Structures are given as structure tokens and as C-alpha cells.
Amino acid sequence: MSQQASAKYLKGATGDWEIVIGMEIHAQVTSKAKLFSGASAEYGGAPNDHVSLVDAAMPGMLPVINEECVRQAVRTGLGLEAQINLRSIFDRKNYFYPDLPQGYQISQYKYPIVGEGVVIVDVSPTERISVGIERLHLEQDAGKSLHDLSPTESHVDLNRSGVALMEIVSKPDMHSAEEARAYVSKLRTILRYIGSCDGNMEQGSLRADVNVSVRRPGEKLGTRCEIKNVNSIRFIGQAIEVEARRQIGILEDGGEIAQETRLFDPGKGETRSMRSKEEAHDYRYFPDPDLLPLEFDQAYVDGLKGQLPELPDAKRARFIEQYALPPYDAGVLVMERASADFFEQTAKGRDAKLAANWVINELFGRLNKEGFDVAQSPVSAAALGAIVDLISSNIISGKIAKDLFEIVWSEGGDPAQIVEARGMKQVTDTGAIEAAVDAVIAANPDKVEQARAKPTMLGWFVGQVMKQTGGKANPQTVNDLLKRKLDV
Amino acid sequence: MSELTHLTLAQARDALRSKKISATELTKAHLSAMEKARLLNCYITETPELALEQARQSDFRITQGSAGPLEGLPIGVKDLYCTKGVRTTAASRILDQFTPTYESTVSSNLMRDGAISLGKLNLDEFAMGSSNETSAFGPVISPWRRHSDPSAKIVPGGSSGGSSAAVAAHLCLGATATDTGGSIRQPAAFTGTVGIKPTYGRCSRWGIVAFASSLDQAGPITRTVQDAAIMLRSMAGHDAKDTTSVDAPVPDYEKAIGSSVKGRRIGVPKEYRIEGMSPEILQFWDQGVAWLKDAGAEIVEISLPHTKYALPTYYIIAPAEASSNLARYDGVRYGLRQAGRDIADMYEKTRAKGFGSEVRRRIMIGTYVLSAGYYDAYYVRAQKVRSLIKQDFDLAFAVGVDAVLTPATPSTAFAQGEQGSNDPVEMYLNDVFTVTVNMAGLPGIAVPGGCAANGLPLGLQLIGRPFDEETLFALASAIEHAAPKIEYPKPWWA
């Protein structure tokens, strides 16, 4: 472990530094209504379209907990293998801001709904780490202040005000930008499997506050800075790199890190101070007297546990076991539930390893290139399965299969029929191939001499034979025949 | 016409049912009395047109035979209750021009049962005060006068001072009120009226401007115990929009009126004999004990040892919650806004202009006790003491006490400006006997027991087990029966 970790140290002018990263992820809960009001939690809509009297904090309005959000938080907690607290408490976090109508955010402070858990993260094909989860709690989102509609006024859109968020707090268990990126990616995968958050970072459904500090290897934790509201996995990585470099620079110059909140500017590639510890709010947390403690029993939790879908780690383990896939391939396939399902449909009753190769290399490669997700694939699992079948039964070669995949991708159709109709079948008739081989040998006596002296010339002959057969000759048969006839 | 305003709510109900009077004439009589009593400043907003329209509909329903339990009965609504289409101020400049698009659950329950709203009653700003002097719409003057100096303007108590004065001056048959630390019971005691704060959770808080959420409860102020029972039955009930409201059936409280109290155990807490209490109040308390004893109740001395901490603890918890509850009045979405250089300046100017000094004081106290470094020393400790206060009562009830009898207030009403002008704590002491009830979430009723030598009314308080308002109504009606009948002041203001 320490061997691996040392590779992650950053070189400074005066020696090695270790980065320590912890994250607070805000994940919008998938639910029709907001956390404490019946207003729609849907993304978009005209400004202030999704605002109830409660969201606008009209006098005398009271919050009522949306049970669906509680259910989603518990399910997520189970997905993080975390402690589920049968009793939790909503607190008020008090501060003034125009997009916070109540003058406080309802959150959970001392007693969150979910306690400690863990996320297993694959950082690379050869490296797994486990990142501890400190807690998960439910809280309200704020509205949005719009400062660009008028030169003299600001406007407020309360559509998001009161939407349910899960704040998922990690332990400071990450030590590089890669680990942090992989953690967010894995967390998003888990949330999507569970269906408790759509994980859409562009729409702000998933946002990260990243805590970064640096220290000399083995020393105690350094002072951290919190980079607020980073909204893409790529930016999370960039923000960590530049912030760690900034801190190392200060420390190596004999300076001290000031604990503060910073913003990442992706355009300039730098972090900037938002507010210092001295300017930090005193949020005056106290239990919200409008809400009773949130209580449920173990049977409720067990019921939800029983209905959870197979989660990525379990699915990955099963793929390794059931399909004999390399762990890395299995990991790639389970990243998205839809991809895993696609693979399983493709692999059903077939050579799973071959199916996995085709799903990962051809299909995913092509989908990525086009910016499609698996649900948008023009090639269905059944069609890809049929292609795999044609390869397995030696009807087409791998090379032809790639052409076939292209045809199915752009034109659609039944792969077997296409192969039949367009004469793409591999020639396995040894007689026909032998004739072609003989013809090529007869026509090129000089090359035959060369090949006998230098066996790597064989490739040239293979190429010629394939040319003659329109690429349909079984390459293995061609090879075998040539070797025999040229006596190499 | 004045005869009509002098009916009790129960009498008016019966007269309406037997068609001896109409809702319209009953309403007109009250509107006319209100018009003549503007000097008392009981109403912030009068709604005569709406009242007459409601009366017309009530009369129609009575003839149709589809009358509700409160059909055609004109009442006043404390201006802390949000009322749809009718300005709701909380007696604060910050909500000066605020008209809700919604009706509070409790007031809509009353309207559902046929009650007619005459208008919105004055109160201390955001229900913070014990004399109605903190209202941004000016103080309410009690109809009661002191023998010694009849020209002195007597306060009606607070915060529900508009409610208590309007009921005592016959400007409505009954009124809604709210009680956070005594705001129903103290004004009732000051005006010779009956006021009940039901168990926390008995009435919905939805649509009532919040002061201190864990303490606020709605309740009625009326001229008789029976009237209070009738009104509370309509006001109470579970509301899915308030998760602290309790889903338990609402009994027919009126049935408890006049029922026997024989064998009921009444606890008399020794800790309520506080230092410096006037002999007149002590004597009055003893009188109350004697009345219940005569009615067959058993009297036991009890101890509520944490009583002395109740008031200071209350003045930590209530302002803490208030400081947060009142943060929404920021000039951004509704209510008063004072332009500023930037957002912080706008907040400061708006809130400085919008809130009166008592509200500002409590916001500052509340902010202080919740702030980092003080939270544990103040708020957390106060909550612990609160549990002990509740435990005191639990222990008393556990040994068979059915209700606790105390004076409602440590003195009779005072005149404007006589209390609290130099030291706010002097004013806070008005709540010394009532705050414990809110802290413990228990029901408490104030019932008049006669007048003091100065000519002003005195009230007794009965405290009951959770959700046992029926016992309170039974005991209060026994006291009402035994005590000298309250002679409400003749309308010197008209």
C-alpha cells in the first residue's frame, strides 16, 4: 500500500508532498416533489414556476417531510453499506441570503439519517481503494440568484428552493486527483443504480465541495481549503491539482495555509479565495421545532434493503465469477446499469468473453465517439449477439465482423441476413483457398524465394490471398496452407 | 341592539337555531358596537362587508337546515392568523401591507362551522408582549377601569390584548387568540374573560404567523367557560400540514361543562407562592381552592421544584426560535422593503424599520443564545431545564393529580407605561405562572374569579394533563359557578 501511495506523492522543490482529499457531494434526490413541500422538483421550468407557499416562506407556513425522499436516503445509505439511523433530527442552518426564503436551510446537523459507510473505488485496472463515508444527510437546496437580468436589480428564482439534496460526506481518504475522480464516478454509479439521484452534473444534480490539504508523507494533517461547488469530474481533478500545487508553493516558501473557502475557475485554471475562516458564517444550528424527529423502524429498513437492485460491486463480482471476465472488463461493464444489462443480453448463451470484447471495444468505442449512451445504441444487444454468433461459428472473420458491425450500426438489419445477402461469409472451403494460394505462389516465384529466406515475408502472401478471396478466406487456413506450401 | 352583543356565544347559538334572531342582525349589532369602540383600538382591520356577506349566507343555511355548529356567530380573529384576502399584519410594520392568499387551518375550521369573522384583532407585535403596548398599530385600551384613577388607560394584557378587550367590551362573541408563554391566559385574566391554551398539538399552527414554534398554540378567548368549550371544539383537530399537530379525536368539550368534579384531585404547587406576591392574590388563590373543595374536589399540596427556572428558560427558548422564525421577513418577497446600497444594507434598513424595539430585542437575544460558543451554555441547558419542568408535572400527574390550580397572573392589570419601560424583565414577570404550561406542552385555562379591591378582574389558572381539556372545562365551570359573576364594564367609550 505504501509502495503504491508513494507513487502518488507530488514532488516539490524541497521534497515529497502528500495530498489529502475529502469530499462533500450534494446529490439531488430523485423525487417528484420537494423535501418539505408538494411543489414539483423537476429541473427547468420558467423561473418561479415550481414554488409553493412553503418554498416562498410565506408567514405561517410549515414544512412536511416528503417520505419518498426519506426512502431514497435510506436506500442510498444501504448502497453505501452505511449505518442507517432509525432516529435523526432536522436542524435549521441560519443565514441570510435572497435565494434562501426562510432565512435558514433545513438540514441535519448532529443526527444525520445515515452514518458511516464505505465505497470501494477502482482507480485503475490494477488499483482499488476504499473511501470511508462519514455520513449522509438530507437537506434543502437553495434557490438561484440571477444578477444578469438588470443593471440595477438582482432576481431570484425559487424553483430549486426546497428541492431535496443528500449531502454525502467522505472521510479524507483520497490522495490524488485520480482517486478523487474515481470516487465521484463510483459514487455516481451507485446513485444511478439505486435510482436515488440521476447524477447529472451539467444540470447540477451532483455537485462537489472538495477539501484539499497537503502534508509531508507521514506527518499530521495540514490545514485544508474547501473548494466549493465543482460541477464536473474533470474539474474536480483539475481543481485538486492546482490547489495542491498552490498550497505546496506557499508552504515551500515558508508560508502558512489559511483555512478558507475557495472557488475553482476552470477558465483560468486557478482557485480563488471566497471567504476566510474569520468571515465564515455562524450558522446557529438548532433543531427545527416545526419538525418532529425523523423515526422509522428496522423493518422499514429491511424492507427497502430487500428491494434494492444488484449494486455495481456485487454485479462486478458476479460477472467475474459467472462469465470469467477479467476484473477490469467486469468493472467497465458495470459502470452503468444499462451497459451491464446490455452486456448480459448480448452474452446470454454465447461466448461471454467474446461478447464482452465486442461490447467494450466496438460498441462502447463507437458510442463514445458519437456521444451516445447505451440506450441510444443503433445496434441492439440481439444484433450484437448475432454478430458474436457469426464469429463464434466461423461464418465470418473478426475483420469482416467489424465491417458487418458498421453496416448494422448505420443501416440496421439482421446480421445473419446481411452476411448471406452480401456474400460476406468466410471461405472455409480448403479447396478454394488452396487454389488461390497456388495461384499467388505461381505468379510470384521471386517472392517465394525471398519468403523461404525470410519467413516474415509470409504476411505479404497472406495479404495477396485475402485480396484474391475478397477478405473472406479464413485467415488461419490461409496461414496453414502457405506455411506448408512454402515450406517455412 | 346592545342586548344582542351581550348574549353569550352559547345563547346566541341557541337563539339563532330557534330563529329568534338572525345572523345578520347579530352581526350588525356587533359591527355597530365596534364602530363606537374604536377608541379601544381592539381591531386592526374591520371587515364589515365580508361579515355581512357571511351573515347572509349563514341565515340562508339556517333556513335550509344546514347550519354548522357555529353558524352565524360573529367572532374576532387575532391578526396573527393568516386570512385569505384580508390583510394580516401580526401588528408589525414589516407586514403592514401583507394580504395572504391562504387561510389558516384554525380560522378556516371556524368558518367551516359557520362562524362569521368581524375583523382582525390587535396584539403585541408578533405576539411578543404582555400588555399590547408593542403593537405597531398602537396599544389596545382595556374596557376595565381602576377605581382609584378611572382615567388611567388599563392594558388588556398581551399578546392577545385585542382579543381579550374585544370580548370583554362585547365587540365579538368570542375571539381566536394564541399563547406562547401566556398570551391567551394572561389577557383573559386581565379582562375577566375565559381563555384556554390547549395541549401543544391540539390545534394546527398552519397559517398562524410563527413566534416560537415549539410553544405556540391557538385557543379561544370568550366570556364563559361553555363558550370556550364550544369554540375550541371547532378550532381543534389534526392537520396534515402541521406535523406537530396530533391525530386524536376532538371530544365534545361542551359536555364537560357543569359535570361533577367530585373526587378530582387538585394539586396546589407550593413553588407558585413567589416572593413579593400580594396578599390579595394569595387570598384569591385560597378562595379558588375553597371553591373547588366545596364542589367536592380533593386538594393536595404538590411540588413543582423547577418552577423558578421556567421564566429564564422560556426567555432563552422563545427568542431563539423567534430569531430564526422571523428571518423570513427580509424585504425580498413580501412586506416592507427599505432600499439599501446592497443586499446587506437593504436587510438592515428593512428590519430596523420594520420591527419594533421588543421584537428587535428578542431577535438579538435569540441570535445570541444560539451563536457558536454560547449555544451549549444557553440553548442546550434551557432545553434540559425544559425537560425537568415537564417532568415535574408528569410526576404530579403520576401520583393522581388531575389538575393544578394557580393564580393566572401575579397581579391585576396595570396602566399603560407602568411596567417594563425601564426594565423589560418587569414585563416578562407577568408570565411567571403561565410559561411553565407552554414549556411542558400542557393545556391551561384562565377563568375569572372576581375582582380585586382596585376594581380590576382576577383570574385563576388550571393546568391539566396532556389532551385532557375536558377536565379543565369541568373544573373551570365549577369555579365560574361558584365565583361572583363578572360585571363587564358599561361602555364608557361609546
Image: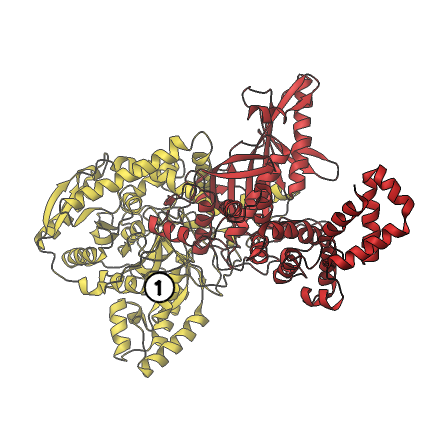
Chain colours: A red, B yellow
Q: Which quarter of the picture shows residue B193?
A: bottom left
Identify the residue at the far bottom of this view. B64
Q: Is residue B388 visible?
A: yes
Report the number of discs: 1
Query: Which residue type carries mark 1?
Result: Leu
Q: Which quarter of the picture shows residue B320?
A: top left
Q: Which quarter of the picture shows residue B268?
A: top left
Residue B176 lies, in percent from the top left, at 35, 59
Identify the residue at the far right of this view. A446
Disc 1 sits on a residue from what chain? B
Say which of B351 and A240 sits in front. A240
Vertical arrangement, residue B106 with respect to residue A173, above or below: below
Q: Quadrant of the C terminus of chain B?
A: bottom left
Q: Residue at x 90, y 52 (%)?
A: A443
Q: Taking A416 as reference, is B187 left or right? A: left
SS at circle 1: loop
Q: Residue at x 72, y 67 (%)?
A: A420
User: Which residue in the structure is indicated by mark 1?
Assistant: B171
Q: Is residue B140 visible?
A: no
Say which of A206 and B150 sits in front. A206
Residue A282 lies, in percent from the top left, at 51, 35
Residue A155 lies, in percent from the top left, at 65, 52
Vertical arrangement, residue A487 with respect to residue B36, above or below: above
Say which of B370 and A64 sits in front. A64
Residue A63 lies, in percent from the top left, at 44, 53
Q: Quadrant of the N terminus of chain B?
A: bottom left
> Crowding near pointer 1: few (<14 within 10 Å), some, many (20+)?
many
